[in-house]
Image: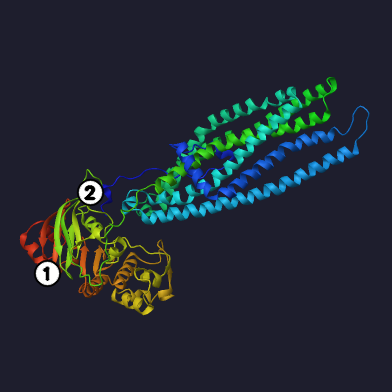
Amino acid sequence: MDTRQLQRDTSLPTFRRGLGANRFRPAERPRDTKRTVRRIIKVYMRQKIALFLAVLLTSATSAISVSIPYFVGKAYNAFDIVTGKLDHPLLFRFLLIIGLLYLSNWIINTTEGVLMLRVSQLLVRTLRKEFFDKLQKLPLKFYDTRPHGDTMSRVTNDVESISSTIAQATTQFISSIITFTGSLVLMLSLSVPLTAVTLICVPLIIGLTVFIAKNSRPHFIGQSRNLGALSGLIEETIMGMRTVKAFGQKRRILSEFSEINADLTRDSYMAQVWSGLMMPMFNVINNLTFTLVALTGGLLAAGNGLPVGTVVSFLNYSKQIGRPLNNVAGMFNTVLSALAGAERVFEVMDTEEEAPDRENAVEPGPSISGEVEFDHVTFGYTPDNPVLHDICFKVGPGQTIALVGETGSGKTTIVNLLTRFYDVDSGSVKVDGIDVRDYKRDSLRRLFSVVLQDTCLFSGTIMDNIRYSRVTATDDEVVAAARMAHADEFITRLPDGYGTFISGSTDTLSEGQKQLLAIARAVLSGSPILILDEATSSVDTKTEKDIQRALTRLMERRTSFLIAHRLSTIRDADVILVIKDGRIVERGSHAELMAKRGLYYSMAKSQGVTEDSA
């Protein structure tokens, strides 16, 4: 395919990052945060009732958590340290309140967690379905200009980051705000001096977070860079292991691996050391605050009559008030990363779909003869770089036309325009005298049986893969198609025959066997127009001759397009078009072109093809 003309998208996939040490990992930043947040809110509003309940429950559990230290202090005040008397009814009442608060908090927190998980998973399901539906509607250009791994990352990692990371961050952010605000209000109502002492932890925690982030970030950058380099080296080495062994590059590969692995180890170690200081230092700040509150509270209780219960409440709040700040700091980088992932999802969702069928588009009739005409067609994958220039030719029903030329000359592009994977820039492509753009797209594509150079198999049995072109075909029809394609011989030798399970990445079948299955699939389709793009490029000479005999019988009733580099496979074509730099430079039969002594003649001689077309 002439995709070398296309611009490649080099954006890297965004992966989920957790809390803890990974909070300082350098994340991809969103380009338009406000717009992305608004779109995410619209997505979440699909589950607005459940989301509202989750937020309400989060607020309730946060408020309960804030109030528990307050009532613990009140319970301590039931004991009069001056007289030594204990107000049993008051103590019992506060203990009952505290117990009910703990129980309520557990029930509400559990309910909120289950509800939020349900919201997250429902959104994952909905978004993935919409994303996958969108992928089916996108033009082929989308897949030709983007790495497949990047698209897969968007539908898996990035979609999940919207529903899980951002959902958890939303409830955690609400909880942190309520916890900090509620604690501050209650502390001020109990004692302003102790509140001032407790708030000493705030600037310390902020300063600590900034300091550790600044020092750990360069190491996380190095870790990410080296991890990517190491993964790339491993993938290339595994895929090219035969080449590595054949050229004796084992020592060089091991040396390169060791160097990158050492750099990764060093950066990973330093990143974890720096980020690992957060919790110990956070505990030091908490303990320092606790000590200062205890000392100040003791002095105020002894000299100013401050109730002991109030001091006890503040000791609890000193442990509690710093946690929201730490949580917010920890999820900041994670949320930015998730927002960037959301942008990547929305970018695909906003991609222009295949042009809709024209208003008066028609269904191809049952008597389609298969006549094809290219009328002054010009086309380029990018507007300023045409690939085809003023292509004109006509193929009668049942005729065979061969397209030959150097790699990148435009042969496959002609087929792409015929099947309407792309639309022409000017001119027209006609089937039975009707512009292909005037047919309904799905119905038009049912007119073609296609065998591509790169065989695509799907997970399932061999029977299922052949039947892919016509799902209503019977088992006998599938077997007949396989016999015509000369695939039945190797299929029957497999342990489970036609029931053998295969997948697209299987190594149990050779490239030639995969191509035979693709040919059998095309035979079964029974479409009036046959397209063979290097259909025999991966089979041996004997198998190629068998396939050629089968294809000759198959093409008797079909208009056939052959794309081939081996000219011996297309000598019997009715018309041969020689393509060079997107233009038809020669046309005619094999004998006519050989007699011209032109470009085709030179190509044929270089391959040892004789002038005899028999």
Secondary structure beneath dot 1 equals loop
Please say whether residue 116 is visible from this viewpoint: yes
* Residue at point 18%, 60% (across, down): 403
Q: How many marks?
A: 2
Residue 452 lies left or right of residue 305; in this view the side is left
Within-10-Å neighbours for mark 1: few <14, some 14–19, many 20+? some
| Disc sitting over residue 613 in the figure | 1
Sequence-earlier tag: 1 or 2: 2
Q: Nearer the viewer, mark 1 or mark 2?
A: 2
Q: Residue furthest bottom?
A: 476
Please say whether residue 608 is visible from this viewpoint: no
Task: Give the quadrant of the N terminus.
Answer: bottom left
Q: Quadrant of residue 579?
A: bottom left
Task: Give the quadrant of the C terminus.
Answer: bottom left
Secondary structure beneath dot 2 equals loop
Q: Nearer the viewer, residue 490 or 385?
A: 385
Within-10-Å neighbours for mark 2: few <14, some 14–19, many 20+? many
| Disc sitting over residue 380 in the figure | 2
Q: Residue furthest top?
A: 303
Picture coordinates of residue 266 (x, y %)?
52, 37
Picture coordinates of residue 304 (x, y %)?
83, 20
* Residue at point 64%, 44% (across, down): 56
Q: Is residue 201 above or below residue 344?
A: above
Picture coordinates of residue 75 (x, y %)?
83, 36
Which residue type does callout 2 highlight? Gly
Q: Is residue 10 above or below residue 186?
A: below
Picture coordinates of residue 600 (x, y %)?
12, 59
| Disc sitting over residue 230 in the figure | none
Which residue type does callout 1 highlight? Ser
Tags 1 and 2 in contact by the CB under 8 Å rule? no
Q: Quadrant of residue 605?
A: bottom left
